[in-house]
Amino acid sequence: MISEQDWQDAQLLWEYQQMHHEPRPCSVAIGLGSHDLGVADTTVDLYRRGMMPLIVFTGATSRTTQDRMPRGEAEHYRDRALELGVPADVILLETHARNTGQNITLSRTLLQEHGVDVSSVLLVSKPYEERRAYATARKLWQEVEFVSVSTRMAFPDYIKSIGDARLVVDMLVGAQQRLLIYPRQGYMIEQEVDDETKAAYVRLRDKGFTSRIVPEVAQ
């Protein structure tokens, strides 16, 4: 059961994990694979607004997506974009990445192989992955500028769109844990985390919202 305090703590993590970047024209958009087809929808919206000439969808499958997206996250994202009218020739697929770091590095390699000159990237992710995606990309691809964006919606509306409140709170806790521990492991740049957000993370973790944390790390 999710208590009122749990909801308040989850809301704090939700707000912290968004970067609030304003979308602007970039060389390319990279849609980061996940269980959320809203990432593809937002990428399509940005394309229609003229924010980029090229899209990379990246992602294999995970335990969260293997049933929903059996052909791979990038493949299902492309299908969605094609259904919404995006031309096939502006979409590149990266179908092997299984984590955020691989999303970045394998997409960079793909773009290099296609001879694409990249100076700026629109990173499109789930709302609570904005900060994690940005911090990871800044660590692994330092020579370009990143704008980290997602579908803009209120936390309760996002819960409704996914249909699984427990999963979303678990994902928030997992993302927050990585923001705290991954900089020390060299996976992303350091991000300042205020005490209130840290306390919210600890309370949710201790309440058992732990299915998406790194299990071997005691935090």
Image: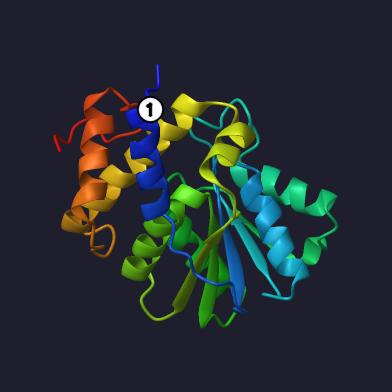
- Residue 72 position within the rendered picture, expressed as x and y whole percent measured from the top left: 61, 39
Residue 63 visible in the snapshot: no
Q: Is residue 84 above or below residue 108?
A: above
Q: Is residue 190 above or below residue 10?
A: below
Q: Going by the picture, which residue comes out furthest to the front? A: 4
Residue at x 26%, y 23% (from the top left corner): 207
Image quarter in which the C terminus is found? top left
Q: Is residue 204 above or below residue 136?
A: above
The residue tagged with tag 1: helix, strand or loop?
Answer: helix
For this rendering, which residue is in front, 4 or 190? 4
- Residue 122 position within the rendered picture, expressed as x and y whole percent measured from the top left: 55, 69
Classify mark 1: residues with Cα within 10 Å, few (<14), some (14-19) or many (20+). Answer: few
Residue at x 62%, y 51% (from the top left corner): 39
State the colouring used for the structure image: rainbow
Q: Is residue 9 above or below residue 24?
A: above
The answer to whether residue 81 is left or right of residue 125 is right
For this rendering, which residue is in front, 89 or 190? 190
Residue 207 visible in the snapshot: yes
For this rendering, which residue is in front, 194 or 64? 194
- Residue 85 position within the rendered picture, expressed as x and y whole percent measured from the top left: 85, 57
Residue beneath disc 1? 4
Image quarter in which the N terminus is found? top left
Residue 186 location, quadrant = bottom left
